[in-house]
Image (cartoon, helix red, strand yellow):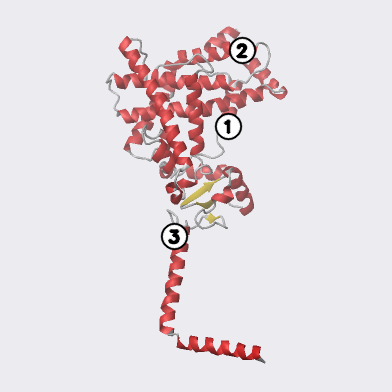
Amino acid sequence: MSLTYKGRAIIDLLSFRFDKIDISISLPVIALVATLLYAIYVLLTLTDKPKIRGIYEVPSALPIVGHLLQLGDDHATVCEKWWRKYKHDVFQIRLGNTRAVVVNSFDACKEMLIGHQSACVDRPTLYTFHGVISSTQGFTIGSSPWDESCKNKRKAAGQTLGRPAMRSYFPMFDLETYCIVRDLVRDSKGGELSIRPYLQRYALNTTLTLCYGIRMDEVYDNLLREVLEVGSAISLLRSASENYQDYIPLLRYLPNNEKTQRGKSLRDRRDKYLDQLLNQVREMIQNGTDKPCVAAAILKDEETKLSGVEVSSICLSLVSGGFETIPGTLTSCIGSLSTPEGQVFQDRAYEDIKRHYADVSQAWAKSLEVEDVPYVNAIAKEAERYYTVSAMSLPRK
């Protein structure tokens, strides 16, 4: 009986209090709270670009992070799974506060990147790579936003690496390929060894010769290894899976930010060896032993139509880019040809060489100057097509 009495007393008290509440006050409060909650939701899901109409969006994006957590460490594989799961070869996703469009199939890539080439020529700027690592030496050509300076750099690099200019580099290629064969024979001692370090030296020496008139003869030269180590680490920091702070700005302001500190450390190490290379060129100019190269032309005030920063960017692009793509492709190709199945292709290539040249020594001498052996050309093109250096292309804007 007493419990029933207490229960009724509580109900009467609550009824009395709710009766006294002014409905005109409670409605604005509810509206304000709802507005604040909606504003917070919008801020947490806001992207630099609104949702693109007509392009499928992958579902289940989370507030703040978007699809970053779902992408994990292997973005390329996850994007391929989404392509097959949702039956869309082009779709949009959210990388934190950034909206991105992923293009998977060959036909879609051809239509977008070739059919709309001028619309995809720009590059996005990322906090870690552009704001931290590249704050001293400028951007590489492939990562530069499109402007007049970038246009000049691409034009100059195209002239430097174009087919007409290649003829003047034949002696350099002759020397570097000779050194590969020489050192492989010397170091293998009839056994097995990894060819990748030798191919890395080849790739880096060709760009160093073009930019600074310098080459390194030892495969495990300290400077050579430093350039390769720093360059590879910087490439990893450009990945979205490595740098959430590029897409979630709040992370940039955390104390003892490991990614920012790592970026600054790599920037300082890169600045050190780039300054070392430039100082070597200055020293050679003073001693009269310099060779024709991009850096020497600038230091001697020769007409280049490029600023010092633009030339530095070109040199940085060549030094940073070649040592990753060329060794990977060559290692894949040589590795495939070295298998029992690959021996067949070697025999066919050798027979095709003998079909075009009466003497093998003549073929060797002509190999740098002409490309008139169809089967060898086919192997080279297939190596470029088959092996993918990077699972995902650099982002376009």
Residue at the limit of the structure toward the right, as seen here: 340
Q: Identify the mark nearer the N-term, 3 or 1.
A: 3
Residue drawn at point x = 47 percent, y = 58 percent: 44
Give the percent coordinates (x, y) of residue 273: 42, 24
Badge 2 density bin: few <14, some 14–19, many ≥20, Cα 10 Å: few
The CA distance from mark 1 to mark 2 is 31 Å
**The one of 98 and 120 positioned closer to us in this rendering:** 98
The CA distance from mark 3 to mark 2 is 60 Å
Secondary structure beneath disc 3? Answer: helix
Tell whether label 2 touches label 3 (CB within 8 Å): no
The image's mark for residue 187 is 2
The image's mark for residue 43 is 3
Badge 1 density bin: few <14, some 14–19, many ≥20, Cα 10 Å: few
The image's mark for residue 339 is none
Secondary structure beneath disc 1? Answer: helix
Tell whether label 1 touches label 3 (CB within 8 Å): no
Amino acid on which disc 3 is placed: Leu
Q: Identify the mark nearer the N-term, 3 or 2.
A: 3
Residue drawn at point x = 43 percent, y = 54 percent: 49
Which residue corresponds to mark 1? 385
The CA distance from mark 3 to mark 1 is 43 Å
**The one of 167 and 32 positioned closer to us in this rendering:** 32
Amino acid on which disc 1 is placed: Arg
